[in-house]
Amino acid sequence: MPQGEFELIARYFSRLGAERADVRIGVGDDGAVVMPPSSRELVVVMDSLLEGVHFPAGSPAASIGHRSFAVNLSDLAAMGAEPAWALLALTLPSADEEWLAQFSRAAGDLCRKHGVALIGGDTTRGPLAATVTMVGIAPIGVALERKGGQVGDAIFVSGSPGDSAAGLALEQGRLHVADAMSAQILRDRFLFPTPRCGIGVALRGLASACIDVSDGLGGDLEKLCAASGCGAEVDAAALPVSEALLSAVGREAAREYALTGGEDYELLFTVPLARLGAMTSAIARGLGPVKRIGSLVAGKGVKVFARGGVMQFSGSGFDHFAT
Ligand SMILES: [Mg+2]
């Protein structure tokens, strides 16, 4: 990009996010220098958002700014790490000042909220895409993993999965909802997802396995099960679907969105029965919106029990099958 455009971009990203005392050299040099705390492990994640792949063309700049950092915060939450530093690689068709202002304001607000400092990055001209690398901190040996779940463990999920997928369908005109307020709530859940950082950190020492829901609850539960070497049974009636989703699409479709939707950025985790008491206490102390939806079982694969029968997860969706 021409020099003037680089200066413009630098103005929006030179001090984005939280001020952190552990950043010795930040944005503006050839590299960043940070001072990790002693006796801690660093957890490193990266996620790309491409126009037309991860968000529809014409999405609001504020949403792209929020989501490109939120999806990485969610991965750190799933690992039980406290977010610290971020790098941003931004590819833009042109340096549109209004777009940059909205993108950086939303990204900065989210980063400050979670104590993250932007310490560097890169800007290129090309099709719109944002790639963020984020580094989090955790005590040695306690980061959460997808493996570690045991037969009998309770399965929990945070928030209300399915909202985001319905919000995306609304954005793309594939879904029409008469109730304007429900429609707006669902759209916002896609455009501005809530990474569950506080819950992720609180689950250290409590959860036996954890994953964040990016590809759909059923598929991500299948990944957790595969990593943990067991299967899962989910009670469809226990799925925490939101009032907005229920009123927008009805109970049957709401469950389908919840199980197969994706882009929720909620945490899906397992808790050994011996720690359920501690889990109940954590919930009472304000852990956040989490709900038990089923149990890990011997075998493999994900089965969902509903009044109409049993559904088996296969590939990307659920098939009804007779037992
Ligand atoms: Mg993930």
Image (cartoon, rainbow, N blue to C red):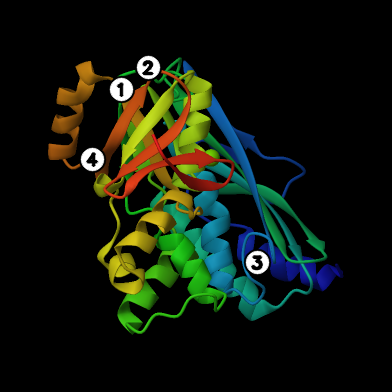
> Mark 3 is on which residue type?
Arg
* Residue contact at pointers 1 and 4, CB within 8 angstroms: no
Is the CB of mark 1 within 8 Å of ligand 1? no
Q: CA distance from mark 4 to mark 3?
A: 38 Å
Q: Residue furthest front?
A: 322
Look at the numbered disc 3 and give the secondary structure of its residue.
helix
Look at the numbered disc 4 and give the secondary structure of its residue.
loop
Left or right of 126: which side holds 154? left
Residue placed under numbered mark 2 in the picture: 150
Residue placed under numbered mark 4 in the picture: 287
Q: Where 56 falls versus 82 (above or below)?
A: below
From the viewer's side, name the closer residue of 300 and 285: 300
Name which residue lies at 42% across and 56% down. Answer: 256
Q: Where 224 falls versus 119 (above or below)?
A: above
Residue placed under numbered mark 3 in the picture: 11
User: How far from the left and from the top, in percent, is residue 18?
Assistant: 47, 51
User: How far from the left and from the top, in percent, is residue 297?
Assistant: 36, 22
Q: Where 175 falls versus 143 (above or below)?
A: below
Q: Residue furthest right?
A: 2
Q: CA distance from mark 1 to mark 2?
A: 6 Å
Q: Is residue 286 visible to us here?
A: yes
> Mark 2 is on which residue type?
Gln
Q: CA distance from mark 3 to mark 1?
A: 50 Å
Look at the numbered disc 2 and give the secondary structure of its residue.
loop
Q: CA distance from mark 1 to mark 4?
A: 19 Å
* Residue contact at pointers 3 and 2, CB within 8 angstroms: no
Left or right of 129: which side holds 315? left
Q: Is residue 41 visible to us here?
A: no
> Mark 4 is on which residue type?
Leu
